[in-house]
Image (cartoon, rainbow, N blue to C red):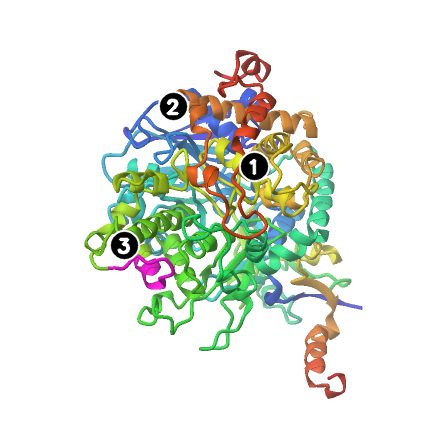
Amino acid sequence: MQKSLHIDPGKCTGCLQCETACSLEKENLFNPAKSRIKVFSFHDEGRFVPYTCTQCDEAWCLQACPVDAIVINAETGSKDVLEDVCVGCKVCTIACPFGTINYNTSSGKVNKCDLCGGDPACVDACPTDAITYIDANATGMDRMRAWASKTDNATK
Amino acid sequence: MAWTRKVLRVNLTSGTVSNEPLNMQWANDYLGQRGLATRYLVEEIDPACDALGPDNKLIFATGPLTGTSASTGGRYSVICKSPLTQAVACSNSGGFFGAELKFAGYDMVIFEGKAASPMYLNIEDDKVELRSADALWGQSVWAADKILRSSHQDPQAKIACVGRSAEEGCLYAAVVNDLHRAAGRSGVGTVMASKNLKAIVCRGTKGVGNVADPKAFMAATKAGKAVLAENAVTGQGLPTYGTQVLMNVINEVGALPTRNMREVQFEGANDVGGEAMHEPRKSDGKPNLTTNGACFSCTIACGRISTIDRTHFSVKDKPEYWINSGGLEYEAAWALGPDTGVDDIDALTYANFLCNEDGMDPISFGSTLAAAMEMFEMGVITTEHTGGMELKFGSAEALCWAAEVTAKGEGFGKDLGLGSKRLCEKYGQPQLSMTVKGQEFPAYDPRGIQGIGLAYATSNRGACHLRGYTIASEILGIPEKTDPLESAGKAGLVKAFQDATAAVDSAGLCVFTTFAWTMDDIAPQVDAACEGDWSPERMMEVGERIWNMERQFNEKSGLTGADDTLPQRLLGEGANSGPAAGKVNELDKMLPEYYEARGWSADGVVTAETQQKFGLPG
């Protein structure tokens, strides 16, 4: 069963535990500046939104890469950057409509979420279950359940 | 190692910036943040100096756990001599600024001297420079933040800033970071403005690495997070209601100071407490509270994100306030509400927004206004002084107006900016100032909660709940329940809380974790992060060392045991209602026992023996 990251911004408190976990996993540092997942704080609206790669099926970053440095992980479905192939041209960062693949000034390569090979560190770190890793075919299950409970008169 | 081992020194007089290695001997003795920065302050300034003169220094300090994934590991403190109390000032803040400073590679920044004209410090990792703040001076924190974000074009930058109240000399001005988190107490913002320093803009991309034992650190911090999640206070009460969970609880035990502490229970408590923030309002059906928000790395997330009712008189013609921002925490809600007798939650939220917007400590502001209201009722302060405003207890209009004029330092706002002690002295009523060492009380009446009275009287920064939060034991039963009306045994309790808190602060953690964590939960996290052996016993020893060092700073500043006291109202006038009716605070019974437990002389002086025991600088 393929899984995908599922984000519920309504549960996010903006603590950045996901960012420190991601940077520790990937860079061996607590360093949100190098995190592959980013929480945006919309101050005036009072909202926090975690944001990362959705692993598009037809991945534009992968299509755009001139040196085939982005490959599909058959097991998880993630699109992974091969660091030793990447030449740091940044064309993928232009191709990605969501901005979730980024250049890393320390390495001279691009970084993106690779689902940590199937065990995402951000999911484990999130204290409110705002980020979960669930069946890719039924990411709407929670929302369906919530609406079902509202529309089912038999439970009232 | 967790420490970056680097200190940034900024001389505002000469306009120079330099780096130096962190004194690791001191780091081993004082851990970080509060303790370590105070050690630097003791070394570098004369405690008798003018707090608002160029000889005072201003230190922004992180702890070894700041910037890590330890829950609440994002805190920093601002340390200097206080212009409000003449004692050591150490104000702690959350948000994201502290972690960013660490990510840029610094354990602390020491500001010295005074700039010839307004400046701000820009930090981008190793690139650090002073820049002109001419365009920022005269602007609120919120306005300055907008200007800086626009000119830097960096949405990720973190900003700490002072507002107009600080520029105008309000003695309880705060340093505000991330728009609504504040190093709030004792006038640290006033000191920053006195140096012509408007803001620090920080961007750090280096991160925090090389914790001593990464595997043990992840295990210890994970275990700590589980304890916080499972605890009723940190896992449920605080995320749902914030610190406002306390409003009704404290009112019921008869320790909610009301109308300048004349009374101990407020009839409107229910209208301004944590539950009320969840109630849908009539105008738009939305509650005051939008959501809860966390500071960096915090898995509790007690922060309130709120709106003001757009139809409320305070904002109906001001769309700039129709936004979400930092909402009411318990202490602020109390000072702006019960202490002024105002039960209008939108007025409180508006005043709280203004305290954030222009960097004022809401506790000191509300308490000072309460004293002014009492003097207005007595006829000592009149509409001639205020320019027409009737400063009546319970007046939401008066509260909103007072916040506006104090924020800008206009008219009677200048008087309110003096703080309660100086205001009451100015109008010839010093007995009406509800302060210790010149700093206003927080939200617990020490007649109904005896131990907190001793904690207020002996706090090294003047009246304060965060120097020894005995409420945890006396009201909430953490770690064990003690009778709030009983003064016996409280000396030891106060000392234990004071020492533990000094250690928690110095680690870079939030004291709210201690609703769930004991030192047995905290020490393993510090031990795994830092070199050396950090047992719970060593943490407590470090805490006690810090406490004694702060006390000695205050002694040299001119404070004595005679300053370890409470206003006559709390020592001589019995509580007027509730479980504590008729009771006064029994400070005279607790204080001698406390001095003895501390190893101080009968008149409260740190003895040579105690000084030697802790290896204090003296």
Q: Which mark is residue B468?
A: 1
Q: Is residue A110 magenta?
A: no
Residue type at the position of mark 2: Ser
Residue type at the position of mark 3: Val
Q: Earlier in the sequence, mark 2 or mark 1?
A: 1
- Alpha carbon separation for disc pair 3 and 2: 32 Å
The residue lying toward the viewer, choosing from B286 and B573, is B573
**Can residue A136 be seen from the camera position used here?**
yes
Residue type at the position of mark 1: Gly
Q: Which span of residues is magenta-colored?
A: B389-401
The residue lying toward the viewer, choosing from B259 and B239, is B259
Do dots 2 and 1 share one subunit? yes
The residue lying toward the viewer, choosing from A149 and B480, is B480
Q: Which mark is residue B460?
A: none
Q: Which residue is mark 3?
A: B405
Q: Is residue B430 left or right of residue A50?
A: left
Q: Residue at x 74, y 66 (%)?
A: A134
On-image quarter of the N terminus of chain A: bottom right
Q: Residue at x 30, y 42 (%)?
A: B423
